[in-house]
Image (cartoon, rainbow, N blue to C red):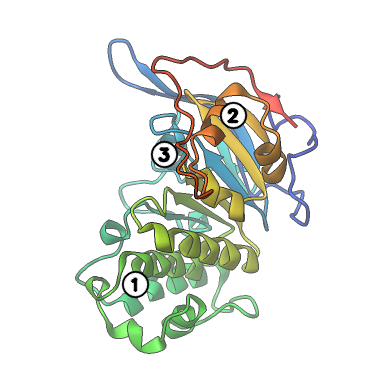
Amino acid sequence: MTETEPHMSGDVSPGSSTRAVLSARDVVVDYPGHPALRAVDGVSFDVHPGEVIGLVGESGCGKSTMARVLTGLLKPNAGEILYNDQPLKPLGIGGRAADSTGIQMVFQDPGSSLNPRRRVGPQIQDGLDAARRRLGRTLKEGHPTTPGQWLERIGMTPSDAERFPRSFSGGQRQRIATARALAAAPDVLIADEPISSLDASTQALVAYVMSSLTVAEGAGMLFISHDLAVVRLIADRLLVMYKGRIVERGPAEEIWADPHHPYTKALLGAIPLPDGAGKLPAVTPPGTQYPLEEVVR
């Protein structure tokens, strides 16, 4: 099934809009080589305002390639991306068009995505300026209008706006990157492995801040991760990716409680349990292959 077909159970999260703000339609991405490497193989899904979708899978399954396609950083070999029902314009040499800044991305390493030579206040201001260029001078009611207000939203202080990124911990820098992205008043936020470089003690906090602020802004969110334990805490729906394809999709709690696809079962079996008994997670034998047929709930 592709999401060009009528929505079925699990395709729209409760409380979210039925209008898709970002859609992938039969996306294919091949990387050059002999033979070429197919990184994404016919992927389709929708992101709706007010919902959090978790895209999960092991390293190398095509998750980050999909993120680059969704943000216009990479042109697919086939298929298309629709943003508000219009074909997404690829990112050009001169930067992103103003009407495309409604798609924002939070990258894996905030140490690289934040400019180390600029104070964090002006970097958050960049997001506010992008929102005003796209929406006009008047932002929607309740949207913070200064970097200081955004820093307060993420649990920091307005005076932090005068500090440089190096003054903050990794978790704080990722929250600042989130504030900069959401300051642009996006329709959708793409978070590509945003917690993988953080300490385990801060991963859940950062994921919660990102998801709760995104939903509060009325935006949709695609949260990409291989950490299913954290994704379960924030996601309304899950997309399970294996070898460039979506092999299972549906409500997050349903998949967690009763996974159908053998690859999903293997992912869940690899999560350590805090049971105090010293049990190791299940280990998949090397070379194990899983079917590519999709399970839709």
Residue 65 to residue 92: above or below? above
Q: CA–CA distance between discs 2 and 3?
A: 22 Å
Secondary element under disc 1, as helix, strand or loop, is helix
* Residue 23 or residue 63, whichever sits in front: 63
Residue 215: image x %, image y %?
A: 63, 63
Sort mark 2 into few (<14), some (14-19) or many (20+) by Cα contacts within 10 Å: some
Residue position marked by numbered label 2 in the rendering:
265
* Residue 79 or residue 254, whichever sits in front: 254
Extreme residue toward the left, this view: 117
Mark 1 is on which residue type? Gln
Residue 210: image x %, image y %?
A: 52, 63
Residue at the (52%, 38%) spot, across then down: 56
Q: Work out whether mark 2 precedes mark 3 in sequence or the reverse, and give the earlier one.
A: 3
Q: Are marks 2 and 1 in contact (CB under 8 Å)?
A: no
* Residue 2 or residue 206, whichever sits in front: 206
Residue at the (59%, 79%) spot, across then down: 138
Mark 3 is on which residue type? Ser
Residue position marked by numbered label 1 in the rendering:
123
Residue 112, image quadrant = bottom left
Q: Nearer the viewer, mark 2 or mark 1?
A: 2
Pick the quarter of the image with the N terminus: top right
The numbered disc on residue 181 is: none
Residue position marked by numbered label 3 in the rendering:
64
Horizontal side of 29 relative to 215 (left or right) equals: left
